[in-house]
Image (tube, rainbow, N blue to C red):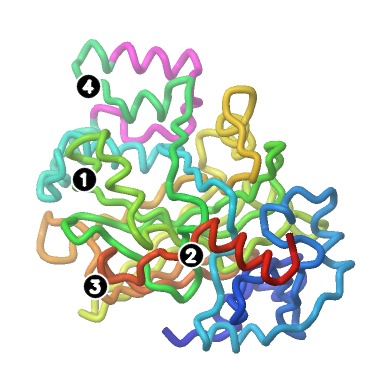
Amino acid sequence: MRLSSSEILPHDRYTGSLVGRVEAGDGPHVVAIREAGLFDLSRLAPTISDLLELDGAAAAVRGHAGERLMALDEALEREALLAPCDLAAVKAAGVTFADSLIERVIEERAKGDARAAESLRGELLGLLGGSLTGLRPGSDAAMSLKNVLVVRGLWSQYLEVGIGPDAEIFTKAQPMSAVGCGAAIGLHPKSAWNNPEPEVVLACSSRAEAVGAALGNDVNLRDFEGRSALLLSKAKDNNASCAIGPFIRLFDESFGIEDVRHARVRLSVIGSDGFSVEGENALDRISRDPLDLVAACCGQEHQYPDGFMLFLGTMYVPTSDRHGAGQGFTHELGDVVRISSEKLGALVNVVTTSDRAPPWTFGAGALMRSLAARGLL
């Protein structure tokens, strides 16, 4: 893919505190993304996880000069811009929007059959009064609805985490396995019904503090997960199936959690077959506050000493028919997926299958050896 800096930067360009990772020939370097280029932060923080632990991370980044490694455009041309996270756990919150909740219930009832989705969608929307928007999870109203649905034999494990008291938090991918902007993103080769998931990803410290945010694609295999929720790992954690980027925007005076709460995340998919689809994920329609999801992920019961990246979920699931009436949306090889938001820039990837994507070979051990060789440990 040929990308330029103008295609992936936020609308306010270099105003914010932008950090990421770049392959510089001797291993991944933590960098600040500035108008004058990518500047090495390794002496400030050898890993992104270390950076997120700093008090006043944004101010520390602005105060550290660092060595200029290359221009952002050069990094894109060399396909050297990596996912902006390293040792952090990669977690995801599921069923956090009413719209996507309905789609999850459809997957479960369709048992992985895309052709059954259209009729189920109409049936469920009718039974649920057209929308669940505004229903607060765990509230008395939500529990009353649950009782009605149980009596009618319509309760679902997805409704349980969507409107019940406990959020769904799962492991999306392993540390170091996410791909960055410009990379190929992988689908399991046996999946025939799948979709991108455009999301905001919070970058969090080990103290469960949200320090910044990025964009993410939590690729979903609707047929696998629809057949059984116990196939979640096979539906989610495959080679190159998690994209994060293009960088982390640290919280500072120009960008904070309120910007996340009101973010609009746009999705476009353009296929080599001429098919295209667009949609939007509106974070102000999320059913659980982002910081409540952070607390559900990390606390007295769950610790992440290297921090964590937390996908916040999506309300938008493409359903446009691609191959005929009633068959809905699924990816094709070569699809270009663009996920964008005004203050977070654009994450762009091209679709392949997980067995064709470059294998994941550089893990935590390789990173430690690289840092040791550079005298950073």
User: For the residues carrying marks 4 and 3, which lies nearer the camera in this image?
Assistant: 3
As helix, strand or loop, the secondary structure at mark 2 comes to: loop
Where residue 280 appears, x then y in whole percent? 45, 58
Q: Which comes before the other along the chain, label 1 or label 2?
A: 1
Q: Quadrant of the N terminus?
A: bottom left
Q: Secondary structure at mark 1?
A: helix
Task: Give the label, 1 or 4, closer to the camera.
Answer: 1
The answer to whether 19 appears left or right of 313 in the picture is right
Of callouts 2 and 4, which one flags the residue occurring earlier in the amino acid sequence?
A: 4
Q: In percent of the image, x 12 and y 66: which residue is there?
A: 323
On residue 334, the disc is none
Residue 362 badge? 2
Name the residue type under label 3: Leu
Label 4–label 3 contact, CB within 8 A: no
- How far from the left and from the top, in percent, is residue 164? 43, 21
Q: Which residue is mark 4?
A: 154
Tell which tag, 2 or 4, sits nearer the viewer: 2
Label 4: which secondary element:
loop
Relative depth, front residue between 289 and 300: 300
> Which residue, given by chain and number where applicable, does mark 1 sit on?
224
CA distance separating discs 1 and 4? 21 Å
Give the SS element for disc 3: loop
Question: Within 10 angstroms of label 3, few (less than 14), some, or many (20 or more) residues?
Answer: some
Q: Quick one: label 2, few (<14), some, or many (20+) residues within 10 Å? A: few
Above-or-below relation of 334 to 178: below
Residue 62 point in image, percent of width and height: 85, 67
The residue under the point 46% across, 72% down is 348
Start-end of magenta stretch: 127-148
